[in-house]
Image (cartoon, helix red, strand yellow):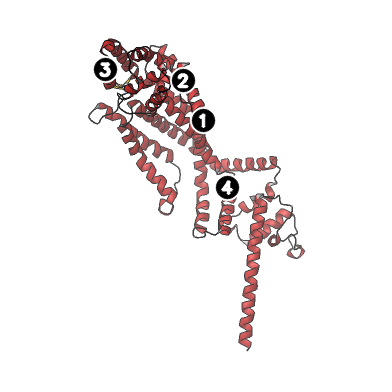
Amino acid sequence: MNVILTTYQGAILGPIARVLGYILQALYALLANFGIENTGICMILFTFLVNGLMMPMQIKQQKFSKMSMIMNPEIQAIQKKYKNKKDQASQQKMSLETQAVYQKYGVSPASGCLPMLITFPILFALYRVIYNIPAYVPQVYDVYSGIAQQIKSAGVSVEQLSKMVSSSTYVVTNAVSAAKNSDNISYFVDVLGQFNTNAWTQLAAKCPDLKTAIMEVAEKSKHINTFLGLNIADTPAIKSVSVIIPILSVVTQILSTKISMAGTQQPDASDNPTAQSMKTMNNVMPFITGLMCFMFPIGVGIYWVAGNVFRIFQGIGINVYFSKIDMDAEMAKNVEKNKKRMEKMGLDPNTTMQDIAKQRTSSINNKTTQAKSSNKNSGINKNANTVSKKDSPNNGGNKNYKKGSIAAYANMLARDTGDKDKKEYRINSQSSGKSQTGKKK
């Protein structure tokens, strides 16, 4: 119960963090059976495992990126077409034409964002677990609980312990705040779990009667927290071998970003503010992360490096996988799936944007093309003389369009475009008539 007390209690991330905590606990217990009690190794395996579980979402994200390569020229053409048109009618038409492209290829814009929306909460929850391992792994909690009780009995407070920690993390801050209303031993454990070598030395000096017990726990803590000769509770230093962690973080993140973008057509950054921002972020973020490594314990840096290494191999594997897939065939499957989905929703694909989408986006607003498409969909005779005023595309088209459907929306725009053309024609005719009258006089 004490362990559960100080786990992250957020409404959304809390439950996810506890599930991840059970996975970490199982990994630690498994390694302990082989005589390996090391949080560094456990953390790396844990990071690999969780990222592996998220791989299907990463594949889906990459698939959307590959499909975007095929669609981007047409999407960019539409954006360029309406670049300087900010009025509502133009924005509506741009949205309509963009929807036409997506429907033509059977792709939903949301399919590119959904994997990230699912992945982010998991990654944030994973960070909470990594940062406070004793709260999620009972075996690690037990390493500190004994000395924590003795320190508490000696009159040392959680706040006093917090001042010995090199960096005041949210774990330490929360423990100090909660300890004001409770003397539960778990809050002492939370802070002790953040101790590095220097902090243990300070504690031994403050409690000389407990020096032997404190140094025994410090040695045990060092044993389970040492990875490649580095104490993961320490902070990296420039004049130390630990500087390799920030360097590896920068290098691996750059490689991971480049590999994930390999084979993906990037939009022209010179004429696209969003693309410029993304390019700048991709170039700057690895170095920002490297600097942040100096502000957090080595264990956090190891977590970042491990995640980057996994994504490097994952990116290579995904790129090889997609190099063997016919994306045109995938597009055809998407169109078919989209058609069946619309039929299940009670919509007739033939009366939606499908016919418009079959045309090149540059001719979506071509009145002649719209008239032919409308006549074909509504079963009207191709002979223009037999088309009634009621069914004319420029007079509302088929009145049986479902209210709020894409088809009704497209038809409304076609009607508005026709009305505008008629108005311009009348004005031009009147102007021409006046001109002719002026000439006769």
Quadrant housing the C terminus: bottom right
Seen from the viewer's position, the closer of residues 380 and 423 is: 423
Q: Which mark is residue 12?
A: 1
The reply, left or right, for residue 295 in relation to residue 344 is left
Q: Which residue is mark 2?
A: 5
In this view, the mark in front (4 or 3) = 3
Category of crowding for the residue at label 2, using alpha-carbon neighbours closer than 10 angstroms: few (below 14), some (14–19), many (at least 20): few
Amino acid carrying mark 2 in the image: Leu
Nearer the N terminus, badge 4 or badge 2? 2
Amino acid carrying mark 3 in the image: Lys
In this view, the mark in front (2 or 1) = 2
Seen from the viewer's position, the closer of residues 380 and 19 is: 19
The reply, left or right, for residue 59 in relation to residue 45 is right
The answer to whether marks 2 and 1 mark residues whose Cβ atoms lie closer than 8 Å is: no
Give the Cα separation between the discs numbered 1 and 3.
40 Å
Give the Cα separation between the discs numbered 4 and 2.
48 Å
Q: Which residue is mark 4?
A: 102
The answer to whether marks 1 and 3 mark residues whose Cβ atoms lie closer than 8 Å is: no
Q: Measuring 52% from the left and 31% from the top, which residue is drawn there?
A: 56
Seen from the viewer's position, the closer of residues 228 and 173 is: 173
Nearer the N terminus, badge 2 or badge 3? 2
The reply, left or right, for residue 184 in relation to residue 424 is left
Give the Cα separation between the discs numbered 2 and 3.
28 Å
Nearer the N terminus, badge 4 or badge 3? 4
In this view, the mark in front (2 or 3) = 3
